[in-house]
Image (spheres, helix red, strand yellow):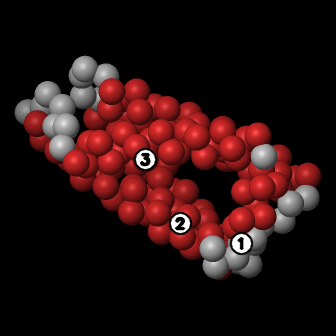
Amino acid sequence: MKRKNWLYWLLVLISIATVLSGLVQVASPGFVLHIVGGATDPAGEHFFRIVGLFMVLFGGMLLQALLSAADHPLAVLWSAFQKLGAAGAVGIGFSRGFFSSTSLLVAGFDLLTGILILVYWRSIRQGGR
């Protein structure tokens, strides 16, 4: 049984935002790269489109898992891994000089989101016992 508390609804909003921001990244990677201070050359834009595609996929998976009548702990867990991995990747990109300090806001948001998803995952995993 789903626990539709503040965390559930926050994650619904975050998953929608992840899908939408991923779509923006696919459609206009140069715009997003400019915001985070990344290189806007053709290769950078191509790879940023790929990252945006995975944001759409994982954000959509989390949204579907949340809105489904049944709990889907594995989908929720892997969504947390995606957010934590993204936080690490952006942090490494910043430390290597690929992104500006603005990117640390993105990394921090993804880190916090990954932790919140893990908290939610724990609640649905324990509720299924």
Structural crowding at the residue carrying mark 2, measured as other residues with C-alpha within 10 Å and reported as few (<14), some (14–19) or many (≥20): many
Identify which residue is drawn at 49% across, 32% down: 60
Note whether 61 is above or below 100 in the view shown. above
Q: Which kind of residue does numbered mark 3 sit on?
A: Ile
Relative horizontal placement of residue 29, taking residue 105 as reference (left or right): right
User: Residue 77, can we see it?
Assistant: no
**Element assignment for label 3:** helix
Q: For the residues labelled 3 and 1, say whether their Cβ atoms are less than 8 Å apart.
A: no
Question: Based on the displayed image, in which of its 4 quarters is residue 128 positioned?
Answer: top left
Q: Which mark is residue 99?
A: 1
Residue 3 shows up from this direction: yes
Alpha carbon separation for disc pair 3 and 2: 14 Å
Name the residue at 82% across, 46% down.
46
Q: Counting residues from the N terminus, which is met first, the one under dot 3 or under dot 1?
A: 3
Q: Quadrant of the C terminus?
A: top left
Residues 111 and 88: in front is 111
Q: Earlier in the sequence, mark 3 or mark 2?
A: 3
Seen at 91% across and 58% down, the residue is 41
Which corner quadrant of the image does residue 19 belong to? top right
The three-letter code of the residue at mark 1 reads Phe
